[in-house]
Image (cartoon, helix red, strand yellow):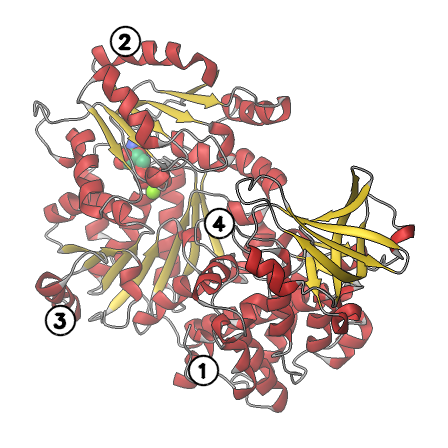
């Protein structure tokens, strides 16, 4: 992430990984995918274990089954016989007390000769075993010169790896990156640092990367705790800066009479639930007050959040403002558009959908209409907070499935206007601790009841062994006109896991049921996805039902997961259900049967699923309560999954973990509050150090805000 005003002290940390010696494009790309693009990302990549290489006996004393580090003379090479590549290449070595051979399978001769020249001394480290009465070390982990003995003969950190990078290579690269880490000005309160006996930043970083025992890997070790606190403080500061700006400038008092809301109510074919009425009331009050709204609307899938959002949008529009509705995926943005636009048309309100896909002239036209105010509601994806997008007068921003967006993205949308009210929506209940970590304080409304006519989904667990039975049952349902959704976890056959691929399943189902079986997955173009969806969800998207082109069985990867509504589907099959999170499964099944018909969800589980995993899935069979399910999920899987950060690539926190560092949250929040109240623009010397901290954690968006003043 380029940043113009980054303090000089951080330059080295934000140089690309490729600036490190020995990191070419091939390794660079792998590292980038594993950790991130910059040196700092390598530094945040903490060891997950230790490996003791300090055992360094004479050869005659070597105990097998341990990792040993030996200093040996290289005596001779015995390459594999020319036509017998299966016989390994051996290098015979010794010290004063005995012999050891180094064994290499399928290795490059020139390389071995280069690193183990005959007549020289080398340090080798790895596992030894006895084979044919001979001591041997197969593929030493480390081969180096004797000058490095001390460096090898110690306890090494063990890092989480990615395919194609060895422990040794990654260890060396991280070691080299650490040399780029400067001493930082202390941004923490010195009294607190003393009280907690925390090391300075630079010492903490170095300690974390040179653990000498298991305890030092603990998230609560002094070094890791300090760095976690740094991160939590940075987050809280950035939240306070963004929010401070939001609330300091008073909000508009959007006090609409409610004419549009009433008109919409008349258009609806249903009665609002009491929860919906209450949430709408709470939102109306927020909007009418002279402060800015920041409210989270929680409600299980199918609880009817969209209509509540629409009411708040109408408040703003009636008041002469624009409204934005942001969704995490293009499919979802289009789905919102296709349900909302017809309603708004009845009310004579202009509405447009904008995604990354809109290019060229049509995009220009859309942007123009947003900038000159002729469009009232803008529905879109991330495209909405791009710089080029200028609203004429934005009054409210609604963020759907908010957990899919970064905290800055969510809050910064609010800065697209002068005094924007913000409504965040989520179907995944967020426990209070997490809420505090991500937002500081905010208001909440919860939809506790589901609209009438929404039958709970009948959920069943079936072993994949019985897939033939499932096919038969599906065949019967299809002949009665059912629409069926089939969800697979991954697109392509992964090398290691036997995940049944959506493409294969599609082929198989098509061979049984014919051309009314469709496929949709994440690597398809957006257009193709929408087109396929519309052929499936014919009634919704207004495609002629008798169209022979229509699909009755749709095989999909999890692209449909978030928020996409498929009311006409009454059956959902989820393959390898055990690979999904419980909340995710609950969300998925909530997509079907929304038009009140009886619906069924079949959770197909792997043949060799253990009892615990199976009982986990039975939670879904036994309850429809999303809150209960989310709690179970949190217990089982941790916060990252719950917040959906998994899908967003890098976790929201690099160092801190909500579970382990909960105790630091209130401290960080209180300290941030105090700091901002004393030094709102962070200009004191401590304030400057804190700015460095914000840049370090790439929270500098919020600094831009204080600079813009
Ligand atoms: P979610 O909370 O999952 O976003 P939606 O807002 O998409 O749920 O609503 C789910 C479905 O329920 C939609 O088809 C919507 O039209 C319908 N719905 C919403 N409120 C009510 C209600 N009070 N009575 C009946 N149906 C409703
Ligand atoms: Mg929704």
Mark 2 = which residue? 476
In the image shown, does 507 or 399 lie closer to the viewer? 507
Q: Residue at x 39, y 47 (%)?
A: 279
Whether tag 1 and tag 2 are in contact, CB under 8 A, the answer is: no
Q: Nearer the viewer, mark 1 or mark 4?
A: 4
**Residue 610 falls left or right of residue 94:** left
The residue that disc 4 covers is: 646
Sequence order check, earlier mark of 1 and 3: 3
Crowding at dot 4, Cα within 10 Å, few <14 / some 14-19 / many 20+, comes out as some
Question: Looking at the image, is mark 1 or mark 2 earlier in the sequence?
Answer: 2
Residue that carries the numbered disc 1 in the rendered image:
706
Give the residue drawn at x 67%, y 68%. 227
> Could you classify mark 3 by the number of other residues whose Cα lies within 10 Å: few (under 14), some (14-19), or many (20 or more)?
few
Quarter assignment of residue 385: bottom left
Distance from mark 4 CB to nearest ligand 2 atom below 8 Å: no
The answer for how far apart the CA atoms under marks 4 and 2 are is: 38 Å
């Amino acid at each position: 992430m380029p940043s113009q005003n980054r303090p000089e002290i951080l330059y080295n940390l934000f140089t690309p990984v490729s600036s490190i010696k020995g990191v070419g494009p091939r390794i660079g790309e792998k590292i980038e995918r594993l950790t991130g693009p910059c040196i700092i990302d390598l530094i945040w990549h903490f060891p997950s274990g230790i490996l003791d290489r300090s055992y360094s006996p004479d050869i005659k004393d070597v105990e097998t089954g341990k990792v040993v580090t030996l200093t040996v003379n290289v005596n001779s090479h015995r390459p594999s016989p020319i036509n017998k590549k299966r016989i390994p290449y051996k290098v015979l070595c010794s010290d004063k007390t005995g012999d050891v051979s180094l064994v290499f399978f399928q290795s490059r001769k020139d390389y071995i000769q280069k690193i183990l020249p005959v007549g020289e001394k080398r340090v080798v480290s790895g596992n030894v075993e006895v084979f044919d009465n001979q001591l041997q070390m197969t593929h030493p982990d480390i081969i180096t010169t004797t000058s490095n003995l001390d460096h090898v003969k110690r306890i090494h950190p063990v890092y989480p790896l990615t395919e194609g990078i060895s422990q040794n290579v990654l260890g060396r690269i991280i070691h080299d990156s650490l040399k780029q880490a400067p001493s930082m000005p202390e941004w923490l309160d010195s009294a607190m640092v003393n009280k907690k006996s925390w090391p300075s930043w630079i010492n903490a970083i170095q300690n974390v990367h040179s653990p000498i025992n298991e305890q030092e890997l603990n998230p609560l070790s002094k070094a890791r705790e300090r760095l976690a606190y740094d991160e939590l403080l940075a987050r809280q500061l950035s939240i306070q800066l963004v929010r401070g700006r939001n609330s300091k400038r008073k909000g508009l008092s959007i006090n609409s009479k409610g004419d549009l809301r009433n008109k919409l109510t008349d258009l609806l074919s249903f009665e609002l639930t009491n929860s919906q009425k209450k949430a709408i009331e709470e939102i109306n009050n927020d909007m009418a007050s002279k402060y800015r709204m920041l409210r989270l609307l929680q409600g299980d899938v199918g609880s009817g959040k969209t209509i509540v959002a629409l009411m708040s949008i109408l408040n703003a529009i009636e008041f002469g403002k624009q409204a934005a509705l942001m969704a995490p995926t293009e499919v979802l943005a289009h789905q919102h558009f296709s349900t909302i636009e017809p309603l708004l048309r009845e009310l004579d309100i202009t509405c447009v959908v904008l995604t990354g896909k809109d290019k060229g002239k049509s995009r220009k036209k859309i942007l123009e209409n947003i900038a000159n105010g002729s469009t009232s509601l803008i529905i879109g994806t991330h495209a909405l907070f791009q710089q080029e997008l200028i609203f004429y007068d934005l009054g409210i921003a609604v963020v759907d499935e908010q957990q899919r967006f970064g905290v800055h993205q969510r809050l910064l949308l609010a800065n697209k206007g002068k005094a924007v009210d913000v409504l965040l929506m989520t179907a995944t209940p967020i426990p209070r601790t997490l809420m505090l970590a991500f937002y500081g304080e905010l208001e909440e409304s919860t939809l506790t009841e589901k609209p009438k006519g929404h039958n709970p989904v009948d959920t069943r667990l079936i072993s994949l062994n019985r897939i033939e039975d499932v096919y038969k049952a599906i065949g019967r349902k299809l002949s009665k006109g059912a629409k069926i959704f089939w969800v697979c976890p991954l697109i392509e056959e992964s090398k290691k896991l036997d995940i049944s691929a959506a493409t294969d399943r599609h082929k198989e189902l098509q061979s049984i049921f014919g051309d009314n079986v469709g496929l949709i997955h994440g690597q398809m173009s957006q257009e193709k996805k929408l087109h396929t969806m519309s052929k499936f969800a014919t009634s919704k998207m207004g495609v002629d039902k008798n169209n022979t082109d229509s699909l009755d069985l749709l095989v999909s990867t999890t692209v449909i997961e978030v928020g996409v509504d498929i009311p006409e589907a009454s059956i959902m099959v989820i393959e390898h259900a055990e690979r999904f999170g419980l909340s995710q499964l609950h969300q998925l099944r909530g997509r079907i049967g929304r038009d009140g018909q009886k619906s069924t969800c079949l959770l197909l589980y792997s043949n060799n699923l253990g009892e615990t995993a199976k009982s986990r899935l039975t939670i879904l069979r036994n309850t429809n309560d999303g809150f209960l399910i989310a709690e179970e999920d949190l217990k089982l899987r941790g916060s990252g999954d719950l917040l959906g950060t998994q899908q967003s690539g890098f976790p929201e926190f690099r160092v801190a973990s909500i579970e382990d560092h909960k105790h630091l949250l209130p401290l960080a929040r209180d300290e941030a509050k105090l700091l901002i109240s004393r030094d709102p623009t962070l200009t004191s010397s401590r304030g400057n150090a804190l700015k460095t901290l914000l840049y370090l954690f790439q929270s500098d968006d919020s600094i831009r805000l204080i600079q813009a003043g």
